[in-house]
Amino acid sequence: MIFAARSDDYGQGFIGRAQNFIDSFAFESHKYGLCAEIVIADWESQVPGQLYERIVWPSTLLGGGRVITVPEGTAVASQVLSPERLERYLPSAELRDRVLEFGELPMYEYLAKNVGARRARAPWLLICNPDSVISSEIVEFISRQQLEPTHFYRAYRVAGRELKPRSVPPSEILAEVASTLPVFVGGTTFLTDTSQAYIHESGDFLLVSREDFEAVGGCPEAPFNTHLDSMTMLKLASLRRGVFQSILAYPIYHQPHVATAGSRPAPSLDTIMQWGREMMCYGPESFIDSDWGLASTTLAEQQFLPDEQQQR
C-alpha cells in the first residue's frame, strides 16, 4: 500500500487521517491474515524522520511499514521542470510559460507515489491516498489471493464525515464507515478504448500488479498533478493493447479535508484523453522515464516491524 505525504501536516489534519487509515487497515488485515506493507513517501521533509515518529504504528500491522524520505534539495525541480519534460507534457509554449511562472509545487504527488512503488517489495501494489478508509470487504477480497495478473482493480469512493483519530477503536471506525456505505455494482471490462476506463478519482485506489506498473513506468512524472491519476489508468490500459479493468463492488470512504493542491496550469482532460488514445495505438513508451521514482537516487528510510516479524 503506497501513498505520499508531507511531515509538515500539509493539507491540515493529515496525520490524523493517515492514522485512521493505518489503524483501520491494520485491524482488518490482521483479522483476515493479509500481510501487506504500508510504504509512505515523505516528500521534501524538513525534519527527516519526523513523519515516522508522529505515526503510531499498530502491532497488528502484519506487513509492517516504511517511511522513505525525499529530503529538501533532492533536485526534483530540475528534473520535473527540465526543458525535455516541459516539452513533453505541456503542448503549448503559452502553457509552459505559465507553469514556469507558477514555480514549484509543494508536492509532486505522483512522482512521490512512484518513489514508494519503485522501492516496494510486494508483487501487487495498491496506489492510494491516506485520506481514505479501506472497507473491510476490500481487505477480505485482497486476502483471498485470487487477483488476476492481467487485471487492475478500482474502487468507488464515497464522501464521509471527519473521523477523530484514535478516539475510538479501529473496529468502531470501520463499523461507522460500513453503516454509511451505499451498495455498488462492480464488474470487469476488457479495455479496448479510453472511454471505457473508469478514471474518476483513480488516485485514491488503484490495485495493480508490480509487473504491469513497472512496464508502464509508473505514474507520469509531469510538472503538475492534475489528471495524472487518469493518465496512469490510460497508460495501463495501453498495455498489451488492452487489459481488464475490474471495479470492485465495495467502496472506499473518503475523510474530508481542506483542498491545498492549488490551481497550477495543466493540460485539459481532453488533452490527457487524446494522449490515452495515442497510447492505445502506439503504447506508453513516450511517457516513460527511465529514472522514474528517483530510481538512481539513494533515499533514507525507516522501517517498522511488528512483533511477529521482530521475533523471527
Image (cartoon, helix red, strand yellow):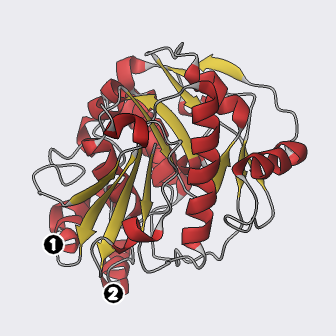
- In the picture, the disc for residue 139 is none
Residue assigned mark 2: 101
Residue drawn where x is 75% and y is 46% of the image: 171
Q: Position of residue 79 (x, y in %)?
A: 17, 65
Count of all numbered marks drawn on residues in the image: 2
- Residue found at the far front of this picture: 311
Q: Is residue 32 above or below residue 52?
A: above
Question: Percent x, y for residue 261?
Answer: 52, 74
Q: Dot 1 lies on which element?
A: loop
Q: CA distance from mark 1 to mark 2?
A: 18 Å
> Which of the pair 1/237 is nearer the observer?
1
Residue 261 or residue 205, whichever sits in front:
205
- Residue 135 percent location from the top left of the image: 71, 39
- Say what amino acid the circle numbered 1 marks: Ala
Left or right, 202 with respect to 161, comes to left
Q: Is residue 50 left or right of residue 243?
A: left
Q: Is residue 279 visible?
A: yes
Residue of label 1: 75
Q: Quadrant of residue 182?
A: top right
Res. 191 in view: no
Identified at 38% across, 77% down, the residue is: 105
The disc, 1 or 2, on the residue closer to the chain's N-terminal end is 1
Q: Residue at x 75, y 28 (%)?
A: 249
SS under mark 2: helix
Which image quarter is the C terminus in? top left
Is residue 54 shown above or below 41?
A: below
Q: Position of residue 27 (x, y in %)?
A: 63, 41
Query: Looking at the image, is 39 positioned above or below residue 47?
Result: above
Q: Is residue 279 left or right of residue 179?
A: left
Label 1 close to label 2 by CB (< 8 Å):
no
Query: For mark 2, does the 10 Å Cα neighbourhood hold few (<14), some (14 to 19), or many (20 or more) residues?
Result: few
Q: Which corner quadrant of the image does residue 101 belong to? A: bottom left
